[in-house]
Amino acid sequence: GAVVSQHPSWVICKSGTSVKIECRSLDFQATTMFWYRQFPKQSLMLMATSNEGSKATYEQGVEKDKFLINHASLTLSTLTVTSAHPEDSSFYICSASAGKGQPQHFGDGTRLSIL
Amino acid sequence: SQQGEEDPQALSIQEGENATMNCSYKTSINNLQWYRQNSGRGLVHLILIRSNEREKHSGRLRVTLDTSKKSSSLLITASRAADTASYFCATGLNQAGTALIFGKGTTLSVSS
């Protein structure tokens, strides 16, 4: 149980395009979803926290207009990287939590490469 | 900002040996969690230990927590090649599904 599906797993696109990443909790309702970014051989850095039906809370230094987050349902959150540039290339990972006292369950990540 | 610091950064052992990883953190916590990440993949939750617990077991895993020293350890006994991965500790500041603050991780290599 507690499966989180993240799609796509890998995407390559040209600079200036927008990329949407989906995060779905398949067998539980996720009241909260989290988006992380990970550079090679480094730890996960939290980008934003999203609660279903409300605006996401962004961490300091993360551009809200650059990284658009939508959490329209209890099983789906999306991250859209707008007007992507090479410096946005990274590994993006989402996680979902069923609620209070519950562990976070992670997707398999999306490797984004901007040419 | 990062909360946890794992030690060592890298660890290489032979199959069958035990592997111990340590994690230190800075602020008061509600719980501490350990995750495993295989190369290029997402994270797999291993174990959660609450601030009022001192030790927890799960299969070949043993986690300890010392809140007075703000530190935790993860012991993997009788290691296997499949245990090769990066291991991260993460601290949760409250129970309401709040975001986790991850340490830098320990890369474990188990050779057969």
Image (spheres, rainbow, N blue to C red):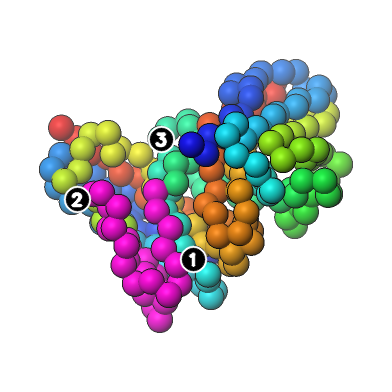
Mark 3 surroundings within 10 Å by alpha-carbon count, few (fewer than 14), some (14 through 19), many (20 or more): some
- Which contiguous range is marked in magenta? B46-73
Residue tagged by mark 1?
Answer: B31
Q: Extreme left residue here?
A: B16
Q: CA distance from mark 2 to mark 1?
A: 23 Å
Q: Please name the amino acid that badge 3 sits on.
A: Asn
Q: Are discs 3 and 2 less than 8 Å apart at CB?
A: no
Q: CA distance from mark 3 to mark 2?
A: 19 Å
- Which residue is located at x 86 percent, y 41 percent? A65
**Image location (x, y in percent) of residue A21:** 70, 29
- Which residue is located at x 15 percent, y 39 percent? B15
Q: Please name the amino acid that badge 2 sits on.
A: Thr
Q: CA distance from mark 3 to mark 1?
A: 23 Å
Give the chain of mark 2: B
Residue tagged by mark 3?
Answer: B38
Instruction: Let me know if residue A37 appears in the view.
Output: no
Give the chain of mark 1: B
